[in-house]
Image (cartoon, rainbow, N blue to C red):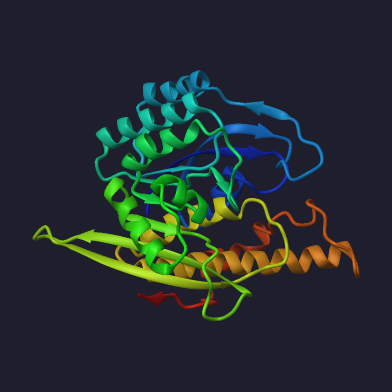
Amino acid sequence: MDCRVLSIQSHVVRGYVGNKSATFPLQVLGFEVDSINSVQFSNHTGYEHWKGQVLTADELHVLYEGIKLNKVNHYDYVLTGYTRDVSFLESVVDIVEELKGANPSLVYVCDPVMGDNGAMYVPEALLPVYRDKVVPVADIITPNQFEAELLTGRKISTEKDAVEAMDQLHGMGPDTVVITSSDLLSSLGDQYLVALGSHVTVKADGTKEKQLIRMDIPKVDAVFVGTGDLFAAMLLAWTHHHPNDLKTACEKTVSVMQHVIKRTINYAKEAAGPDRRPNPAQLELRMVQSKGDIEDPAITLEAVLL
């Protein structure tokens, strides 16, 4: 396999977030990854201090022009995550459209990072760009419940609401929608969070076939940074290996996440010592140590077909 991914995300010197969280796992699974860092920080912003630089839309354009001049701008996938700047996000859309023009089978995986728990943590001006420009060119999107509500303008209170929101998002462009986390009540109890996914396949006769899944994922009493970036990268990888089987792709994606998180928690608790809460440095994802689980994850939960 010689699949090339252009990943445009944040970057940290220390720890795992953005490109640092996505590149290693994708490489382990055989993908060639070219990374453009939307920001370059000393560490993620969950620490008390951070320093660094933010890439501008013009600087993004210059980097992409260099790739294009050398005629090495053929990609199979584009992966994007967190950004705070409207013009930068619009430039990403221009790049995706150009790359899709050169390779119509290119798959664009977008994590539309805007907020969580009812609050936006990027400028509100990004919402119409995501809704009107980014989502229409995306093939796979991984919003959380709040982001799905923002993009569709509808409240999600039930599983039926979530399915209708995913249908609306399909209508805007993407064939695959995964709501990575929600406040919906799990049948397994309040120690689980519910994730939902929907994949539409267009058959040879033009009819559409839809696969709907639900996953009940055990909650973890810790704050991790970079898990959303890892989720999007693993969904890219496993949908590549299981293109019309969202159930299997999501089971492998979530299983990788759980293996990495479990190893991270065990390390963090040991590093912090008895009865002490781990600090951000101790909670950095144990990515390299999880190489075997990334390559061949033991399945830790089964998705339910709806």
Q: Is residue 58 above or below residue 115?
A: above
Quadrant, the C terminus: bottom left
Q: Residue furthest left?
A: 205
Q: Is residue 297 above or below residue 144?
A: below
Residue 19: which quarter of the image? top right
Q: Is residue 195 above or below residue 104?
A: below
Image spot of residue 297 (x, y percent): 53, 71
Residue lying at 61% horizontally and 32% vertically, measured from the top left:
39
Foreground pick, 105 / 158 = 158
Horizontal side, residue 41 vs residue 291: left or right:
right
Q: Residue furthest bottom?
A: 188
Quadrant, the N terminus: bottom left
Horizontal side, residue 288 vs residue 204: left or right:
right
Can the viewer see residue 71 in this picture?
yes
Q: Is residue 276 above or below residue 96?
A: below
Foreground pick, 156 / 255 = 156
Image spot of residue 203 (x, y percent): 15, 61
Residue 151: which quarter of the image? top left
Horizontal side, residue 270 vs residue 175: left or right:
right
Residue lying at 68% horizontally and 68% vertically, measured from the top left:
220
Residue lying at 31% horizontally and 30% vertically, measured from the top left:
98
Image spot of residue 73 (x, y percent): 37, 32
Total count of labels? 0
Foreground pick, 153 / 251 = 153
Can the viewer see residue 248 in this picture?
no
Residue lying at 38% horizontally and 60% vertically, measured from the top left:
239
Image spot of residue 18 (x, y percent): 59, 44
